[in-house]
Image: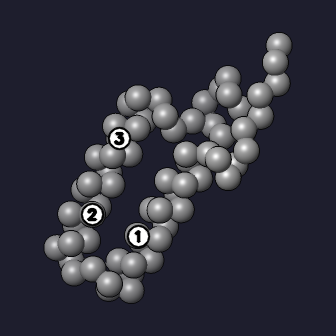
Amino acid sequence: MVNMEQNRIKSKVVWGTLAAQILSILVLLEVFTPTQSEVINQVVGAVLQLLVVYGVLNNPTSSTTF
């Protein structure tokens, strides 16, 4: 069995989480209007749902488990 540990910095989950957190802070600081905030929320939600369906988001510490 080959041990394939993934680097957290290279993880898609980490970068997705970081982008979501930055967007959340920008919405909290009212950089976006409420309408823009709602559109961003819907787009991000749809993209994350598609990534989950395709299995892109998984456990970043193991290549064999979710």
Q: Is residue 39 above or below residue 49?
A: below
Disc 1 residue type (three-letter): Leu
Dot 1 or dot 2, earlier in sequence = 1
Crowding at dot 3, Cα within 10 Å, few <14 / some 14-19 / many 20+, comes out as few
Q: Are marks 2 and 3 in contact (CB under 8 Å)?
A: no
Residue 20 figure quarter: bottom left
Q: Is residue 34 left or right of residue 11?
A: left
Residue 44 screen position, x and y as percent: 33, 55
State the CA–CA distance, disc 2 to disc 3.
14 Å
Disc 3 residue type (three-letter): Gln
Residue 27 screen position, x and y as percent: 35, 77
Q: Residue furthest left?
A: 35
Which mark is on residue 64?
none
Crowding at dot 1, Cα within 10 Å, few <14 / some 14-19 / many 20+, comes out as some
Residue 25 figure quarter: bottom left
Residue that badge 1 annotates: 23
Q: Are marks 1 and 2 in contact (CB under 8 Å)?
A: yes
Disc 2 residue type (three-letter): Ile
Residue 1 screen position, x and y as percent: 83, 13
Residue that badge 3 annotates: 49
Crowding at dot 2, Cα within 10 Å, few <14 / some 14-19 / many 20+, comes out as some
Which mark is on residue 40?
2
Q: Is residue 20 above or below residue 16?
A: below
Colour basis: one colour
Residue 66 screen position, x and y as percent: 60, 30
Q: Is residue 38 left or right of residue 23?
A: left
Image point (64%, 47%), residue name = 10
Q: Secondary structure at mark 2?
A: helix
